[in-house]
Amino acid sequence: MVAIGSLCTIRMQAPVRVVARMRKTWFLLFLWIMFGLSPLAAEETPDIEIWLRERVGRFGDYEFPIIGGSAEYPTPVGAFQVEWKSRLWWSKQWNAPMPYAVFFYGGAAIHEGSLSSHSHGCVRVPASAARYIYNLAREKQTRVFVYP
């Protein structure tokens, strides 16, 4: 047997949750419009993981092929975070374009590039993966793990 008071409590909880969810949505929309802050910035982003030996990377559930640095210019291995990003960076050191560059350690970045030859320490990925990572990775928030 259910008491009348408990039915009222059950019926009142659902609208309260809906209102709370609506308030969060409107608040995030307000931040986005007023300050240009993406609602995704408030959410935690997944880690970027790179396996150099297997030549594969993963960002959340998204997997993609990669190519790392050569033996002479190896890709740094370890735990890092996204330091900064550039939509179209030009490497003065190597006189080469680095589209959708996501820098994680000094001059080492994940960026669009050919997978047919090794890089000078960066992680090259296909164009679609580079755009995906660039758009969703957050500076000073997204962690990058590079495994040998």
Image (cartoon, rainbow, N blue to C red):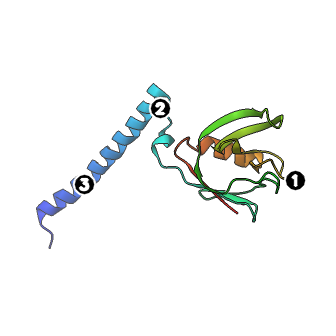
Name the residue furthest top: 34
**Amino acid residing under circle 2:** Trp
Residue in the picture at 22% in, 53% down = 12
Disc on the earlier residue, 1 or 3: 3
Query: Is 39 rendered above or below residue 30?
Result: below
Q: Where residue 13 is drawn, which disc sits there?
A: 3
Q: Residues within 10 Å of mark 3 (few under 14, many from 20)?
A: few
**Amino acid residing under circle 1:** Ser
| Residue 51 relative to residue 72: left or right | left
Mark 1 to mark 2 CA distance (whole Å): 40 Å
Q: Is residue 113 or residue 26 the one in the foreground?
A: 113
Q: Secondary structure at mark 3?
A: helix
Tell us which disc is closer to us: 1 or 2. 1
Disc on the earlier residue, 2 or 3: 3
Quadrant location of the C terminus? Answer: bottom right
Disc 2 target residue:
32
> Residue 38, image x and y in percent?
50, 36
Residue in the picture at 87% in, 52% down = 117
> Residue 137, image x and y in percent?
59, 45
Q: Secondary structure at mark 2?
A: helix
**Amino acid residing under circle 3:** Gln
Mark 1 to mark 3 CA distance (whole Å): 58 Å
> Residue 9, image x and y in percent?
18, 57
Name the residue furthest bottom: 1
Mark 2 to mark 3 CA distance (whole Å): 29 Å
Residue in the picture at 87% in, 53% down = 116
Quadrant location of the N terminus? Answer: bottom left
Disc 1 target residue:
116
